Image (cartoon, rainbow, N blue to C red):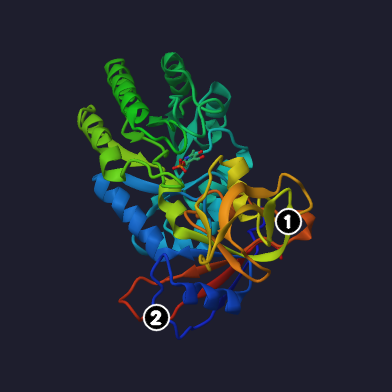
């Protein structure tokens, strides 16, 4: 059993009323005064709102929140509190939901390639649905065959997705019949199909094509006598707004709804959204440490950067809306750099910012997904402290429940 992530959790009542994103300047200053800098403010109200918005756009689809973009305990608790489902991909994630008291029946494990120890950890918790995409992986379920249902992951790659996952995972559609035959021979129950068309997909075109193709695969398999195909998992990829706005989720999901309606009957449809639920919930606040004029541009050095909360600019290829909190006065051509000694640690080298000085705050929005989750402590520079706000769902003004959560060794 792997060690659970170190989580230090302090419940501190605060006199502040419920915080409403995007928060006032005074609220952000008060949070930094209280909890220090850099900070990552995770707003549980936004997490719940995003989850419900996607639920409304995909009625009848069970949304398994993929923990990886923002696995913080407060996010898991917020979604558990509204009956949410979860998508796990590691034993650490299993431990996180177990510790939060999430019922195992609301969890699936979707990593296509895993060790027997990972399968056992998930089984011990009570997860029963797993994913495989090749013969070797099916073989790993032989010893557990009475306790599992396996989804075959099929590769469908959206050309316009920012992150292509099908390069790494998923079988060809042409391999499905063979894998079904192997599973039958091994006695491993296949309960359906899954796919992930890629993350931050601006159009639903490939979701629709993949649903249609899986519909055909299910019909063919049933005709060939494969009983028990009960589930289609349509993955993640639902896009979030960054510097540019993307298609509103209601519009994005409309053709997906139509494609789902045309599927063979008797299927439970699930999805694994991560980014759409998490991105809008994260606000990064950093403090200017110093400045220098170089080649006619002002360099402002922040206490957070590419090795910290802005790591998603490298790993996830996103650019976040950033602005000075004190956004007044004349603007200067500016470079916003991170705190480490590495030259790649530059957040943006073409910004127009007010003339900042040490102590000024800089705010990054839409930073909940694949940001703090990928941060490092390079240079022994501490990553941002995560502050979860609005943890308990309730009436305005009663949420004196600001919760400071520090994840990882610090
Ligand atoms: C198996 C799996 N499910 C779900 C997700 C979440 O995808 P997204 O953040 O695009 O919604 C990912 C992202 O890498 C993934 O690998």
Q: Quadrant of residue 273?
A: top left
Would you say residue 243 is visible in this rendering? yes
Q: Does label 1 or label 2 sit earlier along the sequence? A: 2
Q: Residues within 10 Å of mark 1 (few under 14, many from 20)?
A: few
Residue 28 point in image, percent of width and height: 51, 72
In front of the other: label 1 or label 2? Answer: 1
Instruction: Tell me the residue at 63%/58% (across/down).
Output: 4
Which residue is label 2 attached to?
Answer: 17
> Label 2 CB, ligand 1: below 8 Å?
no
Q: Mark 1 points at which residue?
A: 293
Q: Nearer the viewer, residue 303 or 52?
A: 303
Nearer to us in this view, 406 or 217: 406
Q: Whole-percent x and y of residue 180?
A: 42, 20
Residue 242 against residue 332 in the figure, above or below: above
**Image height of 130 relative to 94, above or below:** above
Question: Horizontal placement of 307 versus 146: left or right?
Answer: right
Q: Tell me the residue at 27%/16% (across/down).
A: 223
Q: Check the image and report above or below for 96 versus 23.
A: above
Mark yes or no: residue 92 visible: no
Instruction: Label 2: state its secondary structure.
Output: loop
Q: Position of residue 296 (x, y in %)?
A: 70, 50
How far apart are labels 1 and 2 at the CA level? Answer: 41 Å
- Front one among 214 and 238: 238
Residue positioned 24% across, 37% down in the render? 254
């Amino acid at each position: 059993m792997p060690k659970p992530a170190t989580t230090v959790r302090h419940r501190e009542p605060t006199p502040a009323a419920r915080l409403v994103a995007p928060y006032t300047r005074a609220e952000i200053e008060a949070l930094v005064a209280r909890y220090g800098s850099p900070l990552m403010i995770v707003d549980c109200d936004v997490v719940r709102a995003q989850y419900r918005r996607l639920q409304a756009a995909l009625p009848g689809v069970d949304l398994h929140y993929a923990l990886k973009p923002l696995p913080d305990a407060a996010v898991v608790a917020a979604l558990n509190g509204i009956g949410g489902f979860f998508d796990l991909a590691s034993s650490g994630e299993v431990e996180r939901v177990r510790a939060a008291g999430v019922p195992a029946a609301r969890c699936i494990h979707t990593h296509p390639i895993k060790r027997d120890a990972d399968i056992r950890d998930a089984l011990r918790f009570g997860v029963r649905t797993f994913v495989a995409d090749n013969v070797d992986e099916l073989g790993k379920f032989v010893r557990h065959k009475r306790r599992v249902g396996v989804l075959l992951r099929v590769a469908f790659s959206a050309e316009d997705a920012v992150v292509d996952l099908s390069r790494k995972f998923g079988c060809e559609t042409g391999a499905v019949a063979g894998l079904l035959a192997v599973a039958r021979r091994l006695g491993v129950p296949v309960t359906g199909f899954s796919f992930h068309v890629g993350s931050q997909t601006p159009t639903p075109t490939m979701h629709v094509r993949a649903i249609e193709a899986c519909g055909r695969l299910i019909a063919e398999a049933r005709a060939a006598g494969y009983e028990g195909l009960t589930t289609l998992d349509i993955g993640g990829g639902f896009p979030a707004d960054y510097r540019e706005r993307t298609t509103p989720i209601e519009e994005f999901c409309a053709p997906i709804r139509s494609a789902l309606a045309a599927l063979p009957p008797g299927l439970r449809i699930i999805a694994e959204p991560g980014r759409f639920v998490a991105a809008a919930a994260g606000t990064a606040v950093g403090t200017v440490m110093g400045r220098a004029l170089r080649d006619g541009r002002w360099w402002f050095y922040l206490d957070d950067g590419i090795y910290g909360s802005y790591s998603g600019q490298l790993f996830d290829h996103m650019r976040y809306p950033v602005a000075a909190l004190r956004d007044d006065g004349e603007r200067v051509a500016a470079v916003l750099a991170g705190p480490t000694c590495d030259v790649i640690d530059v957040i943006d080298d073409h910004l127009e910012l007010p003339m900042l000085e040490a102590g000024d705050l800089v705010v990054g929005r839409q930073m909940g997904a694949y940001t703090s989750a990928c941060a490092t402590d390079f240079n022994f520079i501490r990553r941002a402290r995560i502050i979860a706000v609005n943890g308990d769902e309730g009436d305005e003004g009663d949420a004196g429940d600001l919760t400071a959560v520090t994840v990882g060794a610090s």
